[in-house]
């Protein structure tokens, strides 16, 4: 099994594999997974970080693997009204819901109860399968990427 044990910043080295993971797995520092090409890997990183789409990991043998956020069941709310979108984010955040916020949209893990609450605010959630990159939080460290969908 290939061991991925180092997070790499920047550089132009060639990527030799892709590791596509849902958010729940990307929050862990130690886990087993499979690369897109079928290679079994063990990820062993320092605790406390979150893997984000685009992050790169170095294997013990020098290979470089890129992390990608896997599609997962989410609800996405598109809204051109900044006040309505801010109100939505406030109510979801008040419930400690992991939330991805982008230009004109908010995304959370699909949940029919939350979808009903969103409709009660006068907005319409769309259930879909998409990458989920929630905010790290004010004290969560890590970094975010400006993904636009």
Image (cartoon, grey):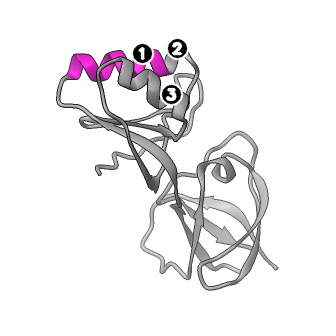
Q: Please say if the residues under marks 2 and 1 sit with CB atoms less than 8 Å apart.
A: yes
Q: Is residue 89 magenta?
A: yes
- The image's mark for residue 94 is 2
Give the residue drawn at x 50%, y 27%: 114
Badge nearest the viewer, 2 or 3: 3
Give the residue drawn at x 54%, y 28%: 113
Q: Main secondary structure of the magenta part?
A: helix
Specify start and end residues of the magenta stretch as a single range: 82-92
Q: Is residue 62 magenta?
A: no
Secondary element at tag 3? helix
Question: How busy is the neighbourhood of tag 3: few (under 14 within 10 Å), some, or many (20 plus)?
Answer: some
Question: How busy is the neighbourhood of tag 1: few (under 14 within 10 Å), some, or many (20 plus)?
Answer: few
- Side of 130 relative to 57 (left or right): left
Q: CA distance from mark 2 to mark 3?
A: 12 Å
Q: CA distance from mark 3 to mark 1?
A: 13 Å
Badge nearest the viewer, 3 or 1: 3
The residue that label 3 is drawn on is: 114
Task: Residue 57: give x, y in percent of width and height.
Answer: 61, 65
Q: Earlier in the sequence, mark 2 or mark 3?
A: 2
Q: Quadrant of residue 89?
A: top left
Q: Earlier in the sequence, mark 3 or mark 1?
A: 1
Question: How busy is the neighbourhood of tag 2: few (under 14 within 10 Å), some, or many (20 plus)?
Answer: few
Q: CA distance from mark 2 to mark 1?
A: 6 Å
- Side of 11 relative to 7 (left or right): left
Task: Residue 6: give x, y in percent of width and height.
Answer: 68, 61
The residue that label 1 is drawn on is: 90
Position of residue 50 relative to residue 140, above or below, is: below
Give the residue drawn at x 75%, y 50%: 29
Q: Quadrant of residue 1?
A: bottom right
């Amino acid at each position: 099994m290939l061991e991925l044990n180092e997070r790499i910043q920047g550089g132009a080295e060639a990527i030799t594999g892709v590791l596509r993971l849902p958010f729940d797995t990307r929050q862990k520092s130690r886990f087993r997974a499979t690369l897109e090409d079928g290679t079994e890997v063990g990820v062993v990183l320092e605790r406390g970080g979150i893997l984000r789409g685009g992050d790169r990991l170095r294997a013990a043998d020098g290979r470089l693997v890129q992390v990608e956020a896997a599609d997962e069941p989410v609800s996405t709310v598109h809204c051109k009204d900044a006040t309505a979108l801010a109100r939505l984010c406030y109510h979801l955040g008040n419930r400690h819901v992991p939330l991805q916020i982008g230009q004109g949209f908010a995304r959370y893990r699909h949940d029919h109860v939350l979808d009903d609450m969103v409709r009660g605010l006068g907005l319409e959630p769309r259930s879909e399968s998409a990458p989920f990159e929630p905010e790290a939080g004010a004290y969560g460290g890590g970094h975010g990427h400006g993904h636009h969908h």
